[in-house]
């Protein structure tokens, strides 16, 4: 049994300690925002925040999480009350098929949490690991910039 | 010896052990000696100034540069042989505009702008000034260049190759990029003292005569390619220890493996595998180029196969007798299964297995070796394994080489990484356990920080 804190709530997890975090989130906790894309840390669809850092949850063994808190897209806002980043993604129509978007938002949120006004070079290199096969990267960057500009 | 030492400590007249010709009791002798030492000091001063002073070579607003396609093609090849772009391009910066920090044991040295920008680059350099820089390590204006710039190797290049490289670099887009300030302590900032370093380590002059394949490979490896700049250990003042040529070294927190024990690997390197490695970054029986070697092979991939084959031939000609270590046989006894192994196994299964487990599709496609053949996992020094776990292998600049590994720096704690590394060593390599992993991991973290 391993204790896991996700979106502020503590859970007792019975899965094997070598299970990747993504499977625990989706299969045990029914948090289906993070997606399985490649399973090899190449696409970023599974990105969540662990201990303040954006990580590929498909490559994080449950045993490696330790006592670090996990935040998934479900922890940011709801359909009714999206957080500023989610609202900006909607406003800038950054979503096409949507498969990569939860990962994109979580990676961007991890940056804005520590650097609310990133410069363009920082923003681009931070977002580089996450891919959008529909090619909406320009709109995604625009949405993140909008949040950065609006924040105090 | 001891009685002399005592003598020097006493008043001179009381020192009976001094030979008479050294006695200072005679006034004329004393003044003559003073005069000689003054002349000696003056001569030494003149000599030192002459040694440490190099004249500027006049700038030219628009120096004559060949621009024909043949020269361009030859120049591009020489510049790729010399890996110029690797050090003279900052991360995300313009090609050849400099600004990359080279983290030397003496402090950070920033590469400079070698685009033809007239103010901050080499736009006003003549071919002669460029040749002097490569042959003698002296800049156009006469200031000494630090040996982080491998002129001790470039000096071996032929006049023609240097001229072609000059023409090619002068044809690149000019970028305004002033030199960054080096992070060297005061004692190393007095550049003329490099004259004495050069006296020790610089044997200037081309080496481009007889050109059978091995000699041609030697010319490329020792000259433009400057392989031994990284693959030979350095002494205390940053000179290559030629008696240990190609024995391997450590730089930028990475281990540059020995190049003269290629036949001692569990699968010995062959000519064709070396050529494949140079042109794709992947040795099917040894692993992928990573760290400082990654941009080098991206650059080598631009060279014609005949050059890569020559370098391979040369490297194979300098091999030591392969050591089939008796260790390998006794290794299982020396390997200890540690408590961490169970934890390492769990980490491996969850974080690495999807690509590196023997059943993973990744290990069954396109020549990707098992970790058991990996040079890094088989090395005595765990540094490169730790480097790759922490930083992964970044996406290459050249899209043709799709080698990639995600970084685990933000995923795994240091104890996790130590357990994982030891597990890899135990399970995949036929070698004794690594020791002191905690310190290696700390050192690698340190090396990954910006200067």
Image (cartoon, coloured by chain):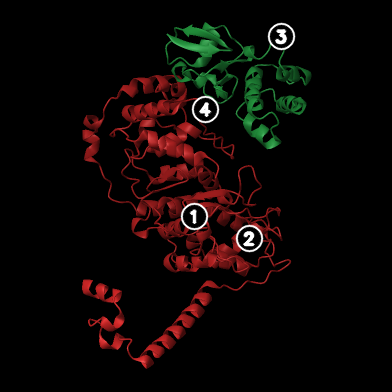
Chain colours: A green, B red
Q: CA distance from mark 1 to mark 3?
A: 59 Å
Which subunit holds the residue at mark 2?
A: B
Q: Are marks 1 and 2 in contact (CB under 8 Å)?
A: no
Q: Alpha-carbon neighbours of circle 1 within 10 Å: few (<14), some, or many (≥20)?
A: many
Q: Alpha-carbon neighbours of circle 2 within 10 Å: few (<14), some, or many (≥20)?
A: many
Q: CA distance from mark 2 to mark 4?
A: 48 Å
Residues flagged by tags 1 and 2 on a common chain = yes
Q: Are marks 2 and 4 in contact (CB under 8 Å)?
A: no
Locate residue A42, reporting x and y percent: 56, 26
Secondary structure state at the residue bearing disc 4:
loop
Residues flagged by tags 1 and 4 on a common chain = yes
Find residue B410 and name its label: 4
Find residue B71 and name its label: 2
What residue is shown at x 59% (from left), y 58% (from top)? B74
Please give the residue where the numbered disc 3 appears in the rendered image.
A79
What residue is shown at x 49% (from left), y 68% (from top)? B195
Please give the residue where the numbered disc 1 appears in the rendered image.
B225
The N terminus of chain A - image quarter? top left
**Which of the 4 image quadrants contains residue A117?**
top right
Q: CA distance from mark 1 to mark 2?
A: 20 Å
Q: CA distance from mark 3 to mark 2?
A: 63 Å
Q: CA distance from mark 1 to mark 4?
A: 35 Å
What residue is shown at x 44% (from left), y 88% (from top)? B35
Locate residue B111, reporting x and y percent: 58, 53
The C terminus of chain A - image quarter? top right
Between B248 and B224, the one nearer to me in the picture: B248
Secondary structure state at the residue bearing disc 3:
loop
Find residue B272 and name its label: none
Which subunit holds the residue at mark 4?
A: B
């Amino acid at each position: 049994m391993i204790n896991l804190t996700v979106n502020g709530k503590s859970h007792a997890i019975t899965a094997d300690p070598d299970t990747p975090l993504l499977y625990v989130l989706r299969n045990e906790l029914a948090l289906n925002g993070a997606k399985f894309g490649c399973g090899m840390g190449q696409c970023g669809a599974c990105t969540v925040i662990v201990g303040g850092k954006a990580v590929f949850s498909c490559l994080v063994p449950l045993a490696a999480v330790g006592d670090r808190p996990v935040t998934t897209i479900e922890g940011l806002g709801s359909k009714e009350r999206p957080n500023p980043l989610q609202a900006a993604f909607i406003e800038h129509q950054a979503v096409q098929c949507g498969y990569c978007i939860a990962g994109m938002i979580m990676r961007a949120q991890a940056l804005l949490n520590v650097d609310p006004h990133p410069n363009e070079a920082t923003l681009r290199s931070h977002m580089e690991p996450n891919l959008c096969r529909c090619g909406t990267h320009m709109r995604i960057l625009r949405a993140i910039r909008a949040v950065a500009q609006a924040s105090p | 010896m001891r009685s002399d030492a005592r003598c020097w400590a006493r008043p001179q007249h009381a020192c009976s052990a001094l030979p008479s010709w050294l006695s200072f009791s005679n006034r004329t002798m004393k003044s003559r000696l003073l005069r000689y030492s003054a002349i000696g000091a003056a001569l030494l001063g003149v000599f030192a100034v002459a040694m440490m002073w190099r004249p500027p070579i006049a700038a030219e607003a628009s120096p004559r540069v060949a621009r024909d396609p043949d020269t361009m093609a030859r120049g591009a090849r020489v510049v790729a042989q010399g890996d110029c772009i690797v050090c003279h391009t900052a991360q995300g910066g313009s090609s050849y505009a400099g600004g990359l920090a080279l983290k030397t044991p003496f402090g950070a040295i920033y590469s400079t702008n070698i685009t033809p920008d007239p103010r901050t680059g080499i736009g006003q350099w003549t071919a002669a000034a460029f040749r002097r820089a490569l042959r003698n390590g002296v800049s156009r204006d006469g200031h000494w260049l630090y040996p982080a710039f491998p002129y001790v190797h470039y000096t071996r290049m032929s006049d023609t190759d240097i001229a072609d490289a000059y023409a090619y670099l002068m044809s690149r887009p000019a970028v305004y990029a002033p030199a960054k300030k080096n992070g060297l302590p005061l004692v190393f900032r007095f550049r003329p003292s490099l004259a004495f370093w050069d006296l020790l380590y610089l044997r200037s002059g081309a080496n481009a005569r007889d050109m059978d394949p091995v000699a041609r490979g030697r010319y490329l490896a020792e000259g433009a390619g400057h392989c031994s700049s990284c693959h030979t250990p350095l002494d205390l003042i940053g000179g290559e220890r030629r008696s240990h040529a190609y024995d391997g070294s450590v730089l930028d927190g990475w281990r540059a493996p020995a190049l003269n024990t290629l036949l001692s690997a569990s699968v010995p390197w062959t000519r064709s595998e070396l050529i494949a490695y140079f042109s794709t970054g992947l040795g099917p029986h040894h692993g992928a180029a990573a760290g400082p070697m990654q941009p080098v092979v991206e650059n080598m991939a631009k060279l014609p196969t005949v050059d890569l084959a020559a370098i391979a031939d040369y490297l194979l000609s300098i091999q030591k007798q392969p050591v089939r270590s008796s260790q390998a046989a006794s290794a299982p006894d020396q390997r200890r299964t540690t408590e961490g192994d169970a934890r390492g196994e769990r980490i491996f299964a969850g974080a690495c297995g999807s690509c590196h487990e023997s059943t993973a599709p990744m290990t069954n496609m396109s020549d990707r070796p098992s970790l058991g053949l990996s040079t890094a996992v088989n090395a005595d020094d765990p540094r490169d394994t730790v480097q790759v776990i922490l930083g992964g292998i970044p996406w290459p600049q050249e899209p043709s080489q799709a080698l990639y590994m995600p970084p685990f720096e933000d995923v795994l704690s240091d104890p996790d990484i130590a357990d994982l590394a030891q597990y890899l060593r135990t399970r995949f390599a036929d070698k004794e356990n690594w020791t002191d992993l905690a310190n290696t991991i700390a050192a690698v973290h340190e090396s990954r920080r910006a200067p």
